[in-house]
Amino acid sequence: MKAQKLFSFVRRAISDYDMIQSGDKIAVGISGGKDSLTLLYALNGLKRFYPESFEIVALTVDLGFGIQDFSKIQEFCDNLGVEYHVIKTDIADIVFESRKETNPCSLCAKMRKGSLNDFAKELGCNKIAYAHHKDDMIETMFLSLIYEGRFHCFSPVTYLDRMDLTVIRPLMYVPEMDVIGFSNKYELPIAKNPCPVDGHTKREYVKNLVRQLNQENPDCKQRFFRAVLEKGFNN
Protein backbone atom coordinates (compact mmCIF):
# COMPACT_ATOMS: atom_id res chain seq x y z
CA MET A 1 0.00 0.00 0.00
CA LYS A 2 1.32 3.44 -0.97
CA ALA A 3 1.08 6.49 1.26
CA GLN A 4 -1.61 8.11 -0.89
CA LYS A 5 -3.94 5.14 -0.41
CA LEU A 6 -3.30 5.20 3.35
CA PHE A 7 -4.09 8.92 3.49
CA SER A 8 -7.32 8.28 1.57
CA PHE A 9 -8.48 5.59 4.03
CA VAL A 10 -7.65 7.75 7.06
CA ARG A 11 -9.13 10.93 5.69
CA ARG A 12 -12.38 9.10 4.91
CA ALA A 13 -12.65 7.76 8.47
CA ILE A 14 -11.91 11.18 9.95
CA SER A 15 -14.53 12.78 7.73
CA ASP A 16 -17.20 10.10 8.23
CA TYR A 17 -17.00 10.27 12.02
CA ASP A 18 -15.90 13.91 12.50
CA MET A 19 -12.78 12.78 14.37
CA ILE A 20 -10.67 15.94 14.13
CA GLN A 21 -11.50 19.61 14.63
CA SER A 22 -9.36 22.70 14.23
CA GLY A 23 -7.06 23.28 17.21
CA ASP A 24 -6.96 19.65 18.35
CA LYS A 25 -3.80 18.37 20.00
CA ILE A 26 -3.72 14.62 19.45
CA ALA A 27 -1.60 12.10 21.35
CA VAL A 28 -0.80 9.15 19.08
CA GLY A 29 -0.31 5.97 21.11
CA ILE A 30 2.83 4.21 19.84
CA SER A 31 3.23 0.61 20.96
CA GLY A 32 6.18 0.03 18.67
CA GLY A 33 4.19 -2.20 16.31
CA LYS A 34 3.30 -1.79 12.65
CA ASP A 35 -0.21 -0.44 13.33
CA SER A 36 0.71 2.50 15.54
CA LEU A 37 3.70 3.53 13.39
CA THR A 38 1.47 3.45 10.30
CA LEU A 39 -1.06 5.64 12.12
CA LEU A 40 1.64 8.13 13.10
CA TYR A 41 2.89 8.34 9.51
CA ALA A 42 -0.67 8.82 8.26
CA LEU A 43 -1.66 11.59 10.66
CA ASN A 44 1.63 13.41 10.19
CA GLY A 45 1.22 13.29 6.41
CA LEU A 46 -2.45 14.24 6.53
CA LYS A 47 -1.65 17.23 8.72
CA ARG A 48 0.04 18.94 5.77
CA PHE A 49 -3.09 19.18 3.61
CA TYR A 50 -6.08 18.56 5.91
CA PRO A 51 -8.41 21.61 6.04
CA GLU A 52 -8.52 21.61 9.86
CA SER A 53 -5.30 22.58 11.63
CA PHE A 54 -4.18 20.13 14.36
CA GLU A 55 -1.09 19.03 16.28
CA ILE A 56 0.20 15.54 17.03
CA VAL A 57 2.57 14.17 19.64
CA ALA A 58 3.73 10.56 19.86
CA LEU A 59 3.60 8.70 23.19
CA THR A 60 4.90 5.24 24.12
CA VAL A 61 4.13 3.52 27.41
CA ASP A 62 7.23 1.55 28.40
CA LEU A 63 5.84 -1.45 30.28
CA GLY A 64 9.15 -1.99 32.04
CA PHE A 65 10.35 -5.28 30.56
CA GLY A 66 13.71 -3.61 29.97
CA ILE A 67 14.35 -5.19 26.58
CA GLN A 68 12.34 -3.02 24.16
CA ASP A 69 14.51 -0.55 22.24
CA PHE A 70 12.74 2.67 21.29
CA SER A 71 15.77 4.44 19.78
CA LYS A 72 14.76 3.77 16.17
CA ILE A 73 11.25 5.06 16.90
CA GLN A 74 12.83 8.22 18.33
CA GLU A 75 14.84 8.58 15.12
CA PHE A 76 11.70 7.97 13.05
CA CYS A 77 9.82 10.69 14.95
CA ASP A 78 12.76 13.08 14.62
CA ASN A 79 12.74 12.57 10.85
CA LEU A 80 8.99 13.26 10.76
CA GLY A 81 9.40 16.30 13.00
CA VAL A 82 7.07 14.81 15.63
CA GLU A 83 7.57 15.30 19.37
CA TYR A 84 8.08 11.90 21.05
CA HIS A 85 7.88 10.82 24.70
CA VAL A 86 8.48 7.44 26.36
CA ILE A 87 6.46 7.02 29.57
CA LYS A 88 8.34 4.83 32.04
CA THR A 89 6.19 2.46 34.12
CA ASP A 90 6.41 -0.68 36.28
CA ILE A 91 3.40 -2.31 34.67
CA ALA A 92 5.24 -5.52 33.73
CA ASP A 93 6.45 -6.02 37.30
CA ILE A 94 3.01 -5.32 38.78
CA VAL A 95 1.14 -7.60 36.37
CA PHE A 96 3.54 -10.53 36.13
CA GLU A 97 5.50 -10.42 39.42
CA SER A 98 3.50 -8.68 42.15
CA ARG A 99 0.01 -9.72 41.02
CA LYS A 100 1.02 -12.84 39.04
CA GLU A 101 -2.07 -12.44 36.87
CA THR A 102 -3.20 -15.62 35.12
CA ASN A 103 -5.09 -13.48 32.58
CA PRO A 104 -2.85 -10.40 32.45
CA CYS A 105 -4.15 -8.65 29.32
CA SER A 106 -7.09 -6.83 30.92
CA LEU A 107 -5.12 -5.33 33.82
CA CYS A 108 -2.18 -4.49 31.58
CA ALA A 109 -4.42 -2.69 29.08
CA LYS A 110 -6.18 -0.75 31.85
CA MET A 111 -2.91 0.41 33.40
CA ARG A 112 -1.35 1.19 30.02
CA LYS A 113 -4.31 3.33 28.98
CA GLY A 114 -4.29 5.07 32.36
CA SER A 115 -0.62 6.03 31.99
CA LEU A 116 -1.17 7.18 28.42
CA ASN A 117 -4.22 9.28 29.31
CA ASP A 118 -2.56 10.95 32.28
CA PHE A 119 0.55 11.91 30.30
CA ALA A 120 -1.53 13.13 27.35
CA LYS A 121 -3.44 15.44 29.70
CA GLU A 122 -0.16 16.76 31.11
CA LEU A 123 0.89 17.71 27.59
CA GLY A 124 -2.39 19.53 26.97
CA CYS A 125 -3.83 16.98 24.53
CA ASN A 126 -7.58 16.78 24.09
CA LYS A 127 -7.59 13.63 21.95
CA ILE A 128 -5.83 10.27 21.76
CA ALA A 129 -5.50 8.30 18.54
CA TYR A 130 -5.44 4.50 18.76
CA ALA A 131 -4.25 2.35 15.86
CA HIS A 132 -7.14 -0.10 15.66
CA HIS A 133 -7.57 -1.15 12.03
CA LYS A 134 -10.42 -2.84 10.17
CA ASP A 135 -9.48 -6.38 11.23
CA ASP A 136 -9.24 -5.29 14.88
CA MET A 137 -12.83 -4.12 14.75
CA ILE A 138 -14.06 -7.40 13.27
CA GLU A 139 -12.10 -9.42 15.84
CA THR A 140 -13.40 -7.28 18.71
CA MET A 141 -16.95 -7.95 17.56
CA PHE A 142 -16.26 -11.72 17.60
CA LEU A 143 -14.61 -11.51 21.03
CA SER A 144 -17.68 -9.77 22.39
CA LEU A 145 -20.03 -12.22 20.72
CA ILE A 146 -18.17 -15.36 21.85
CA TYR A 147 -17.14 -14.36 25.37
CA GLU A 148 -19.79 -11.79 26.40
CA GLY A 149 -22.86 -12.90 24.44
CA ARG A 150 -23.45 -9.53 22.80
CA PHE A 151 -22.84 -7.97 19.40
CA HIS A 152 -20.56 -5.04 20.16
CA CYS A 153 -17.41 -3.22 19.06
CA PHE A 154 -15.57 -0.14 20.27
CA SER A 155 -16.73 3.08 18.59
CA PRO A 156 -14.73 5.08 16.04
CA VAL A 157 -14.97 8.04 18.46
CA THR A 158 -15.26 7.63 22.24
CA TYR A 159 -15.47 10.47 24.77
CA LEU A 160 -13.89 9.68 28.15
CA ASP A 161 -15.82 12.01 30.43
CA ARG A 162 -13.76 11.31 33.55
CA MET A 163 -10.57 12.33 31.72
CA ASP A 164 -12.13 14.89 29.36
CA LEU A 165 -10.36 13.13 26.47
CA THR A 166 -11.70 11.85 23.17
CA VAL A 167 -10.37 8.62 21.68
CA ILE A 168 -10.32 8.39 17.87
CA ARG A 169 -9.50 5.44 15.61
CA PRO A 170 -8.47 6.80 12.19
CA LEU A 171 -7.25 3.43 10.83
CA MET A 172 -10.69 1.84 11.08
CA TYR A 173 -11.08 1.43 7.28
CA VAL A 174 -7.57 0.04 6.72
CA PRO A 175 -7.29 -3.77 6.35
CA GLU A 176 -4.47 -5.37 8.31
CA MET A 177 -2.89 -6.74 5.13
CA ASP A 178 -2.55 -3.17 3.84
CA VAL A 179 -0.93 -2.12 7.11
CA ILE A 180 1.57 -4.98 6.75
CA GLY A 181 2.27 -4.00 3.15
CA PHE A 182 2.73 -0.34 4.09
CA SER A 183 5.01 -1.20 7.00
CA ASN A 184 7.22 -3.33 4.76
CA LYS A 185 7.26 -0.87 1.86
CA TYR A 186 8.24 2.09 4.02
CA GLU A 187 10.48 0.06 6.36
CA LEU A 188 8.87 1.27 9.56
CA PRO A 189 11.12 0.80 12.65
CA ILE A 190 9.12 -1.84 14.54
CA ALA A 191 10.11 -2.46 18.17
CA LYS A 192 9.00 -6.02 18.90
CA ASN A 193 6.51 -6.55 21.71
CA PRO A 194 8.35 -8.27 24.61
CA CYS A 195 5.17 -9.44 26.39
CA PRO A 196 5.42 -13.16 27.26
CA VAL A 197 1.75 -13.80 26.37
CA ASP A 198 1.92 -12.11 22.98
CA GLY A 199 0.49 -14.50 20.38
CA HIS A 200 -1.25 -16.67 23.01
CA THR A 201 -4.39 -14.63 23.71
CA LYS A 202 -8.11 -14.90 23.01
CA ARG A 203 -7.63 -12.19 20.37
CA GLU A 204 -5.06 -14.34 18.58
CA TYR A 205 -7.51 -17.25 18.66
CA VAL A 206 -10.25 -15.08 17.14
CA LYS A 207 -7.85 -13.68 14.54
CA ASN A 208 -7.12 -17.21 13.34
CA LEU A 209 -10.84 -18.08 13.42
CA VAL A 210 -11.77 -15.09 11.25
CA ARG A 211 -8.94 -15.91 8.84
CA GLN A 212 -10.24 -19.47 8.48
CA LEU A 213 -13.83 -18.28 7.96
CA ASN A 214 -12.69 -15.89 5.25
CA GLN A 215 -10.76 -18.64 3.49
CA GLU A 216 -13.80 -20.89 3.49
CA ASN A 217 -16.24 -18.07 2.67
CA PRO A 218 -14.46 -15.52 0.46
CA ASP A 219 -15.15 -11.87 1.30
CA CYS A 220 -17.06 -12.69 4.50
CA LYS A 221 -14.74 -10.34 6.41
CA GLN A 222 -16.16 -7.45 4.46
CA ARG A 223 -19.67 -8.56 5.36
CA PHE A 224 -18.64 -8.84 9.03
CA PHE A 225 -17.27 -5.30 8.89
CA ARG A 226 -20.45 -3.98 7.32
CA ALA A 227 -22.42 -5.59 10.15
CA VAL A 228 -20.15 -3.90 12.71
CA LEU A 229 -20.71 -0.49 11.10
CA GLU A 230 -24.47 -1.01 11.01
CA LYS A 231 -25.08 -2.60 14.42
CA GLY A 232 -21.92 -2.99 16.48
CA PHE A 233 -21.69 0.47 18.07
CA ASN A 234 -25.22 0.58 19.44
CA ASN A 235 -25.44 -2.54 21.63
Image: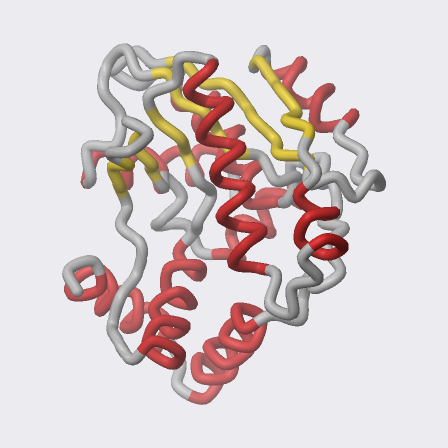
The relative height of residue 138 versus residue 20 in the rendered view (above or below) is: below
Residue appearing at x 27%, y 50% in the figure: 155
On the image, which quarter does residue 53 sit in? top left
Q: Position of residue 84 (x, y in %)?
A: 61, 18
Query: Which residue is outermost to the right?
Result: 67
Q: Is residue 221 left or right of residue 58?
A: left
Q: Position of residue 209 (x, y in %)?
A: 50, 81
Q: Is residue 48 left or right of residue 111?
A: left
Q: Quadrant of the C terminus?
A: bottom left
Q: Position of residue 166 (x, y in %)?
A: 29, 32
Query: Which residue is outermost to the front?
Result: 98
Q: Is residue 234 left or right of residue 125?
A: left
Residue appearing at x 36%, y 49% in the figure: 172
Looking at the image, which is closer to me, 67 or 38? 67
Query: Which residue is outermost to the bottom?
Result: 216
Residue appearing at x 21%, y 34% in the figure: 15
